[in-house]
Image: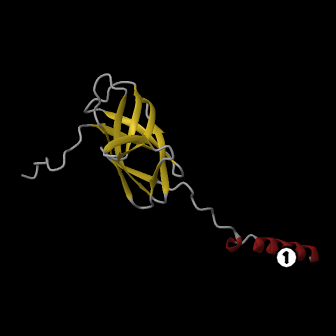
Amino acid sequence: MKTSLSLAAVALALAACNSPADKPAPAADATAAVTAADAWCRPSPNGAKAGGCYVTLTAATDDRLTGGSTPRAAELQVHEMKTENGMMKMAQLTEGLPLAAGQAVELAPGANHLMLIGLTAPLVAGETVPITLTFASAPEVTVQAAVRQPTMAGMDHAAH
């Protein structure tokens, strides 16, 4: 009987050591999501070796768009457009594009954008292009980018 009581006491002591209050909290998920909206690419002329694509990204936590891939090109780069000495210049963002938590970051014509280098075929209006985006922390995001002409500001007369 004394042995049974001793075993029961040891079992209770061990159970108390493993109580839920003593368990470490699960680690925070370091791979917060990034959402992508309105992905599209500009049609490319026959023979073009590069094409531009655009998307709006919103990260749950601070992150960075580092690049991506598509079966439609040999390489996908993140580019910026900036004016230097009165000239528009395009350059690859080798460190990626910062994404501030909760703020929509629009990649758009004449601004930051995705550059598809080494197109395997022209980007034709009406088709879609799969693009997988990579981030410093978040998991990859794959979008289906519609190939279309850009809408021109002030030219939408649908409301008339």
Q: Looking at this view, name the residue that lies furthest to the front.
A: 85
Local packing at callout 1 (Cα closer than 10 Å; few below 14, some 14-19, many 20+) is few
Q: Taking 141 as reference, is 1 left or right?
A: right
Residue at 40%, 34% in the rendered image: 116
Residue 1 in the image, given as x and y percentages of width and height = 92, 76
Q: Looking at this view, name the residue that lies furthest to the right.
A: 2
Residue 68 in the image, given as x and y percentages of width and height = 47, 40
Q: State which quadrant residue 24 falls in.
A: bottom right
Nearest to the observer: residue 100 or residue 32: 100
* Position of 47 relative to 77 (above/below): above
Residue at 28%, 32% in the rendered image: 43
Q: Secondary structure at mark 1?
A: helix
Residue 48 in the image, given as x and y percentages of width and height = 33, 26
Q: Looking at this view, name the residue that lies furthest to the top.
A: 47
Residue at 30%, 46% in the rendered image: 86
Residue 6 in the image, given as x and y percentages of width and height = 90, 75
Nearest to the observer: residue 113 or residue 70: 113
Residue located beneath label 1 in the image: 9
Q: State which quadrant residue 152 falls in.
A: top left
Q: Amino acid at mark 1?
A: Ala
Q: State which quadrant residue 126 falls in.
A: top left
